[in-house]
Image (cartoon, helix red, strand yellow):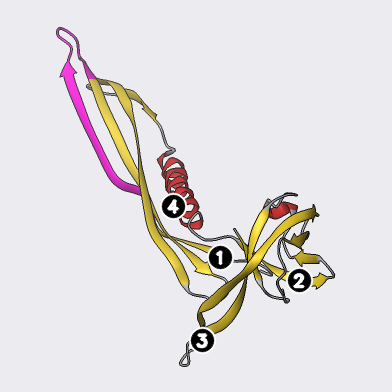
Amino acid sequence: MVGAEAIIKGTITEFEPNKRGRGINLGVALPSTPLGLRVGRNGNTAHVGMDISIVDATNGQVRFSHRVQADSKSGGWTLGVDHEKASLGGDSFQKSPLGIASRNALGQAILAIADDLGGLPWRSQVIGTDHDLIYLNAGETAGIQEGDTYRVSTVVRALVDPATGLLLDTIEREVGQVRIVTVRENVAFAQPLSDFRVKRGDYVHL
């Protein structure tokens, strides 16, 4: 949870292996014989529904929520031969609609999550400074590369709800820009492109 910007939650709310079924059979007597021929078609529909939400890890508020659902149909043929004293037949039926419906619903959920997260701005924070170097709490794993340029902003006011104590928003002021000079796995070193003051906790973003 440390450093997380968003939490993705999902709940399966509907799980119906037999949402809807259908079938039809047709039988005919064979002329001049004591036999009858029976042909049928069976079908089944499975259904899966889930609720997903993206929660802001900094204040616990739900940023986005979606409901996704998917159906999957399966079916098969039946064939039988009937006699006045006996009956013989068999089924050919696909019994995997629930798994297919689950995968389809999960695919819809992933697309919705990707679309929502694409609208969330990426940013890191300043760990500290040392002469002309600024240390950031993000590195190669966050996609930072040497030569990248980022803006630096400082928080001038935090807007806290007096009733709940939740951080609702912040008012920030841009103070300058930095260029990445060294990148490690989880940290990066940057140099300021102009003369400005940076303090621990300031935000670095595109």
First of labels 2, 1 by sequence position: 1
Please give the count of numbered marks on the rendered protein. Answer: 4
First of labels 4, 1 by sequence position: 1
Q: Tell me which segment is drawn in magenta.
A: 14-37
Measured in 3D between alpha carbons, the distance from the residue under mark 2 to the one under mark 4, in whole angstroms, is 33 Å
First of labels 1, 3 by sequence position: 1
Measured in 3D between alpha carbons, the distance from the residue under mark 4 to the one under mark 1, in whole angstroms, is 14 Å
Name the residue nearer the viewer: 187 or 116.
Answer: 187
Measured in 3D between alpha carbons, the distance from the residue under mark 4 to the one under mark 3, in whole angstroms, is 30 Å
Q: Amino acid at mark 4?
A: Ala
Mark 3: secondary structure: strand
Asked if the residue under mark 1 is in contact with the one under mark 2, i.e. CB atoms within 8 Å, the reply is: no
Q: Amino acid at mark 3?
A: Val
Q: Amino acid at mark 1?
A: Ile
Residue at 69 percent across and 70 percent down: it is 2
Label 4, residues with CA under 10 Å away: few <14, some 14-19, many ≥20: some
Q: Which residue is mark 4?
A: 112
Q: Nearer the viewer, mark 1 or mark 3?
A: 3
